[in-house]
Image (cartoon, rainbow, N blue to C red):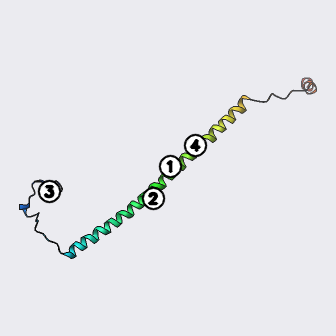
Amino acid sequence: MSGPNGDPNISADDGIIDDEDEFNDEEYAAVNSMLDQINSYLDGIEERNDALNGKLHELLESNRQARREFREHVNDAHAEEDHQHHHHPPPPAEDSASRDSNIKD
């Protein structure tokens, strides 16, 4: 027969398992107190874990929103840049006097 942790060949005859062990009320109270304390610690850890998990989700959503806004800003900047490159105003027209003065020099 295997033991509680899968240890092979442990039987009651080996003297390790003794079903006749009896605990008094003080020992049970001490064990119960320790178990209560462990449960309390585990509850605290679980609460902190839940709080951290919530903060992580908030951070991830904030990061997603910031990335969306950044992409929109970059796309708007590219669209504005494309608009400026494709729609140049025509060069100013030279008047005949300035053109004539450039030729005479």
Disc 2 versus disc 4: nearer the observer: 2
- CA separation in Å, label 1 and label 4: 12 Å
The amino acid pointed to by label 1 is Leu
What numbered label is drawn on residue 68? 4
Q: Earlier in the sequence, mark 3 or mark 2?
A: 3
The foreground one among 46 and 9 is: 46
Which quadrant of the structure image shows residue 7? Answer: bottom left
Q: Secondary structure at mark 1?
A: helix
- In the rendered image, which residue does mark 1 sit on? 60
**Could you tell which of marks 2 and 4 lies nearer the N-terminus?**
2
Q: Secondary structure at mark 3?
A: loop
Disc 1: CA contacts within 10 A as few (<14), some (14-19) or many (>=20):
few
> Relative to 50, does residue 88 appear above or below in the rendering?
above
Q: Residue at x 60, y 44 (%)?
A: 69
- Nearer-the-camera pick, 43 or 72: 43
- Give x and y (percent) for residue 68: 58, 43
Q: Is residue 38 left or right of residue 85?
A: left
Choose top left, top right, bottom left or bottom right for residue 31: bottom left
Tag 4: Cα neighbours inside 10 Å, few (<14), some, or many (≥20)? few
Mark 1 / mark 2, whichever is N-terminal: 2
Q: Amino acid at mark 3?
A: Gly
**Mark 1 and mark 2: span between their CA atoms?**
14 Å
Separation (CA) of disc 4 from disc 3:
58 Å
Q: Quadrant of the C terminus?
A: top right
Q: Of the residues shown, which amino acid type is indicated by label 2?
A: Ala
Work out how far the residue at label 2 is from the one at label 4, CA to CA, in angstroms: 26 Å
Identify residue type, mark 4. Answer: Arg
**Residue 46 relative to residue 17: left or right:** right
Q: Give the residue at x 65% y 35%.
A: 78
